[in-house]
């Protein structure tokens, strides 16, 4: 059935755009700051193609013993290089409503555009966090050295200490904890039990000593849940710039459509963003382009580029 267009196509509706950027700025500021720089979201041109490449020198050899009396020849040490590869993920959001739906409640139909823009900003951040945490969990699971398995008990401060120990002398690089609400409340409850008097009230309120002076991002992301007869939860200890999201500004179109029983307003936005995990690159050959959520969360599609696991995105702690 053909439909008529009541008004011209409006690209980058001012109502959608203003609401989107205002809400996105608020959410991104909270995410970047609350995570202590572990989760970083920026908006810029993501370029062409399906991936974002960044080459780097893969370390240099250490110093060697030198004999001041020798004139023997040396074998040159090669300069090795590698590249980090961020994968580009394509997204859209679309919605439609009748104009009458808004007029009947005394609202300007353009309020729908502002509402759409606000929700788009929230959905963008939520999706980035879900995909990013799934990717980090998958990539880090490739190396048992960055896992502390405390599956037999619920999360307590001692488990966080054991998790930091996985990074050894680089434990100071862990700047943020990301955990599901279940282990978070287990952690707070354990502190109440351990400190009934005095400072415990302070600990429970601020969680600073409880979490070893690192902020906690609490999210009920499914990527942090390991299903089974008894559910297990993954707590991530992340470094700065552990996850980086570079997002292209959304392209939004708004139209009013006639020829239906009621005039409708249809809005559709398209955008993409690249996802990078510190110390890893996306496996272009095996993982392919524009991966599904399941592929992003597949360990085999993330290949380590860091020469040491202490330069990875962080550590994993598994508890009940």
Image: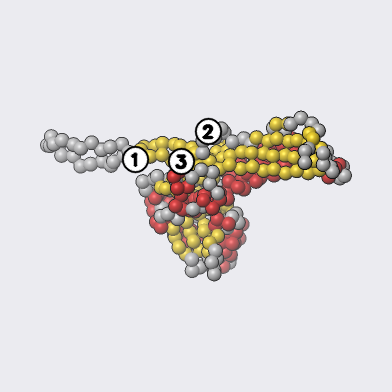
Q: Nearer the viewer, residue 254 or 37?
A: 254
Q: Quadrant of residue 199?
A: bottom right
Q: Quadrant of the N terminus?
A: top right
For the point 59% across and 62% down, which residue is it? 182
- Ranked by sequence position, the earlier of labels 1 and 2 is 2
Q: Residues within 10 Å of mark 2 (few under 14, many from 20)?
A: few
- Ranked by sequence position, the earlier of labels 3 and 1 is 1
Find the residue positioned furthest to the top: 8
Res. 18 visible in picture: no
Residue at mark 3 to residue at mark 2: CA–CA distance: 14 Å
User: Which label sits on residue 85?
Assistant: 3
For the point 28% across and 41% down, which residue is it? 61
- Ranked by sequence position, the earlier of labels 3 and 2 is 2
Q: Helix, strand or loop at disc 3?
A: strand
Q: Residues within 10 Å of mark 3 (few under 14, many from 20)?
A: many
For the point 62% across and 48% down, which residue is it? 126
Find the residue positioned furthest to the front: 1
Q: Picture coordinates of residue 175 (x, y %)? A: 49, 48
Query: Where 67 falls versus 186 (above or below)?
Result: above
Provide the residue designation for mark 1: 59
In contact (CB < 8 Å): disc 1 and disc 2: no
Query: Where 173 falls versus 83 (above or below)?
Result: below
Q: Nearer the viewer, residue 108 or 47?
A: 47
In contact (CB < 8 Å): disc 3 and disc 1: no
Q: Quadrant of residue 94?
A: top right
Q: Is residue 307 left or right of residue 154?
A: left
Provide the residue designation for mark 2: 48
Q: Picture coordinates of residue 292 (x, y %)? A: 55, 49
For the point 86% across and 45% down, which residue is it? 105
């Amino acid at each position: 059935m053909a439909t008529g267009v009541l008004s011209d196509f409006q690209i980058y509706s001012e109502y959608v755009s203003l609401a989107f950027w205002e809400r996105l700025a608020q959410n991104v500021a909270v995410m970047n700051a609350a995570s202590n720089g572990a989760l970083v979201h920026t908006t810029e041109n993501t370029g062409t193609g399906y991936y974002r490449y960044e080459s780097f020198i893969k370390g240099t050899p250490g110093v060697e013993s030198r004999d001041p009396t020798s004139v023997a020849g040396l074998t040159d040490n090669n300069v090795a290089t590698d590249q980090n590869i961020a994968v580009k993920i394509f997204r859209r959001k679309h919605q439609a409503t009748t104009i009458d739906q808004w007029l009947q409640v005394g609202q300007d139909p353009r309020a729908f555009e502002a509402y759409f823009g606000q929700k788009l900003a929230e959905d963008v951040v939520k999706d980035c966090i879900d995909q990013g945490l799934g990717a980090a969990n998958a990539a880090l699971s490739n190396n048992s050295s960055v896992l502390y398995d405390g599956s037999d008990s619920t999360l307590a401060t001692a488990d966080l200490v054991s998790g930091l120990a996985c990074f050894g002398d680089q434990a100071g690089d862990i700047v943020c904890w990301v955990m599901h609400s279940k282990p978070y409340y287990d952690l707070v409850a354990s502190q109440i039990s351990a400190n009934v008097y005095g400072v415990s009230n302070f600990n429970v309120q601020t969680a600073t000593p409880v979490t070893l002076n690192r902020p906690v991002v609490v999210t009920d992301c499914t990527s942090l849940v390991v299903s089974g007869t008894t559910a297990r939860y993954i707590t991530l200890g992340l470094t700065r710039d552990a996850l980086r999201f570079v997002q292209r500004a959304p392209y939004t179109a708004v139209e009013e459509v006639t020829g239906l029983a009621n005039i409708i307003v249809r809005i559709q936005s398209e955008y993409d963003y690249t996802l990078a995990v510190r110390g890893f690159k996306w496996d272009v050959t095996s993982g392919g382009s524009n991966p599904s959520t399941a592929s992003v969360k597949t360990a085999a599609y993330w290949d380590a580029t860091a020469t040491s696991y202490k330069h990875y995105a962080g550590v994993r702690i598994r508890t009940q």
